[in-house]
Amino acid sequence: MTMPEFPADFPPGTGLVHLTETASTNDEARRLFALSADTAVWIMADRQTAGRGRMGRGWSSPEGNLMASLMCRPACGISLMGQLGFVAGLAVQSAIAEMSGLVAKLKWPNDVLIEGAKCAGILLETLSPAPGREAGLCIGIGVNLQYHPTDTPYPATSLKAAAGTAPSRRGLLAVLARNFETLRMIWQDQGFKPIRQMWLENAHGLGREITVALPQEKIAGKFRDIDEEGRLLLEKSDGKTRPVAAGDVFFGSTGDTGND
Ligand code: BTN
């Protein structure tokens, strides 16, 4: 395992490991956590040979896009770690705005959209501790800078496709790391409330009819809110609210891709 450097343009005390190629930066984060979890470390790879996405899907990881994972040990129990996915979504969104001027929106749980098309995804994985130690969290982030897949069940885009040009991976990662740390400190000091508020203000499709695809069923309703655990609150036609912990959201009661 390459030892982290501590770049001057990263938040103080936050490390960086830059790899040419790896299977998945989330796996590297897991390996690093087993060795030492004393400092937060970003692991970035130029290419991933087995990049993974949510719900067991793959993640297209060609050279030119940003693939990075943050290995950290949040000061909270495992049930609240999902809140950091919303912190990460906001950090990606603000880094994109800062570096490319594009207005991105957030799609539950952790996607980042430009004009309704996905340009970034986030995969959270908990890291098991050694006996007697606190659990860790890996926040894996993929941003389509130069390329985007064309065979996805949802529309996808890249910053290059949306703005004509894309920032450098390393430049975007430094801004992302700093924005994440600023938002993480708000979360640590003030709890989930301000993060939830900011996330909802930037959410795609709040108040609209959505369909959530779960492994065994599809449920339709209005996207009303997210709760403390980051679950989507769906108001069904009978007026009852159903919290959803994991699933894929499609816009409209028929489950279209809701490209707006
Ligand atoms: C998703 O939207 O499905 C989540 C995609 C997460 C992709 C990133 S790329 C860096 C990190 N390493 C992985 O294998 N996956 C995440």
Image (tube, rainbow, N blue to C red):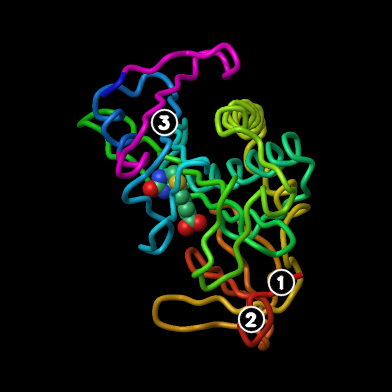
Say what amino acid the circle numbered 3 marks: Ile
Q: How many marks?
A: 3
Which mark, residue 109? none
Residue 47, quarter of picture: top left
x%, y% of residue 181?
A: 60, 27
Circles 1 and 2: CB atoms closer than 8 Å: yes
Seen at 50% across and 48% down, the residue is 82
Using the image, determine if residue 68 lies above or below residue 215.
above
**Mark 2 surroundings within 10 Å by alpha-carbon count, few (fewer than 14), some (14 through 19), many (20 or more):** few
Left or right placement of residue 106 versus residue 1 in this view: right
CA separation in Å, label 3 and label 2: 35 Å
Residue 214 lies in the magenta-colored region: no
Say what amino acid the circle numbered 2 marks: Asp
Seen at 43% across and 49% down, the residue is 61
Give the magenta-colored segment's residue range.
Answer: 3-27
x%, y% of residue 135?
A: 34, 36
CA separation in Å, label 3 and label 1: 32 Å
x%, y% of residue 28?
A: 31, 35
Which mark, residue 43? 3
| Dot placed on the residue nearer the N-terminal end, 3 or 2 | 3
| Element carrying mark 1 | loop
| Dot placed on the residue nearer the N-terminal end, 3 or 1 | 3
Q: Which residue is mark 2?
A: 256
Picture quarter with the N terminus: top left
Q: Nearer the viewer, residue 56 or 146?
A: 146
Say what amino acid the circle numbered 1 marks: Asn
Left or right placement of residue 27 versus residue 260 in this view: left
Picture quarter with the C terminus: bottom right
Q: Which residue is mark 1?
A: 259
x%, y% of residue 255?
A: 61, 82
Seen at 46% across and 36% down, the residue is 76
